[in-house]
Amino acid sequence: MILVKLRDGLSNQMFQYAAARRLAAVHGTSVRIDTSWYDNIPAGVTQRSYELDKLRITGTQASRWETIGTDGVRHSPLYEVPVALFRKIRPRYRFVGERHFHFDSQILDLSDNVCLFGYWVSEKYFLDADEIVRREYMLRSLPSAENERWLGRLRESESVALHVRRGDYVSNPANSEAQGTCDPDYYRRCIASMRRRLHDPVFFVFSDDLNWARDNLPLSGDTDYVDHNSGKQSCEDLRLMSSAQHNIIANSGFSWWGAWLNSNKGKVVIGPRRWMKDPTYQTHDVLPADWISM
């Protein structure tokens, strides 16, 4: 069994699960998901909820009995300490934390019965299980009538899904300092590149700040702003972005997954060369090799 400890929003949950799912496939075993982080999210961290249950994953949530001791003895409730101590002496899993942000090939060779804790932001962690991941990352729900109309427009035009990520990248000082945002110049260069490469592209803009997008992107009549999915329905935008012909992504896992799940064989995907503002992060493994960095 592979245990994966989740944290943060949907796109990060998808990276974390994908690495675990690939490892489970290698060993012919199952994935158990530890969602306990969402019960007591640390102060100063953006509030999130568990969302993988919106996808057709085969992994199931772990029971508390299965996760006792995986956060260390001193973080265990008093009544769990005896079990946590026993599991420290005789571990149920080998705990494997992420050592650095860039790809770590040693993760691919892990044995069964490990507990994964990290972000694993690279397709290299699951590329040899990509068919499994694509199958399990289909939404369980059918699209609404409104989303069905948008899907038709995306599929019938030379559509480019363009994503702008701001939100807590701007409002949270820690995120702003570490992550940063893609500036208007980045989008200008991406849009110009798409217009050179494609005949009559139509841009579909997705964002948590569409007002900023309208004010700062050099777009005109060849543009639609997708604004009807919000809150618990935000995951619907993932289906829409993956149904476009091409993608311009932000430094955001949400649009990364929208582009990666895009099954158009001739797709053009443009992403930011620098994924994190903090220069101590090595981010060269984030974009797949066939995507264009800008």
Image: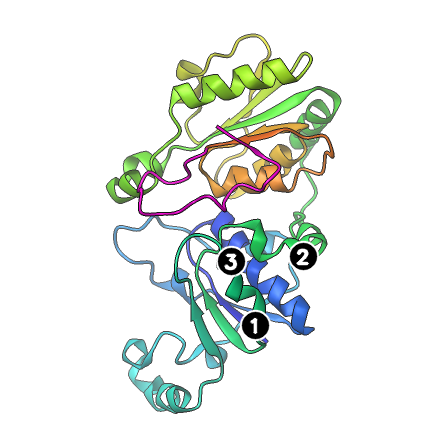
C-alpha span from label 1 to label 3: 12 Å
Type of amino acid at the residue the image marks with label 3: Gln
State if disc 3 and disc 2 touch (CB < 8 Å).
no
If you read the primary sequence from the N terminus, does the residue marked by circle 2 or circle 1 appear first? Answer: 1
Residue 194 image point, x, y percent: 59, 19
Q: CA distance from mark 2 to mark 1?
A: 17 Å
Q: For the point 69% across and 29% down, which residue is it?
A: 151
Q: Which residue is mark 2?
A: 128
Name the residue beneath numbered marker 1: 2
Question: Which range of residues does the magenta coloring cover?
Answer: 273-294
Q: Position of residue 9 (x, y in %)?
A: 45, 49
Identify whether 69 is placed above or below 195.
Answer: below
Q: Is residue 175 left or right of residue 284?
A: left
Q: Residues within 10 Å of mark 1 (few under 14, many from 20)?
A: many
Give the SS element for disc 2: helix
Q: Is residue 151 left or right of residue 204?
A: right
Q: Amino acid at mark 2?
A: Asp
The residue mark sitting in front, 2 or 3, is 2
Q: Residue at x 43, y 45 (%)?
A: 283
State whether residue 204 is above or below residue 242. Answer: above
Kind of element beneath mark 3: helix
Q: Quadrant of the N terminus?
A: bottom right
Between 167 and 127, the one lying in front of the other is 127
Closer to the camera, 146 or 30? 30
Residue under label 3: 16
Residues marked 1 and 3 touching at CB (< 8 Å): no
Where on the picture, by quarter, is residue 19?
Answer: bottom right
Q: Residue furthest top?
A: 221
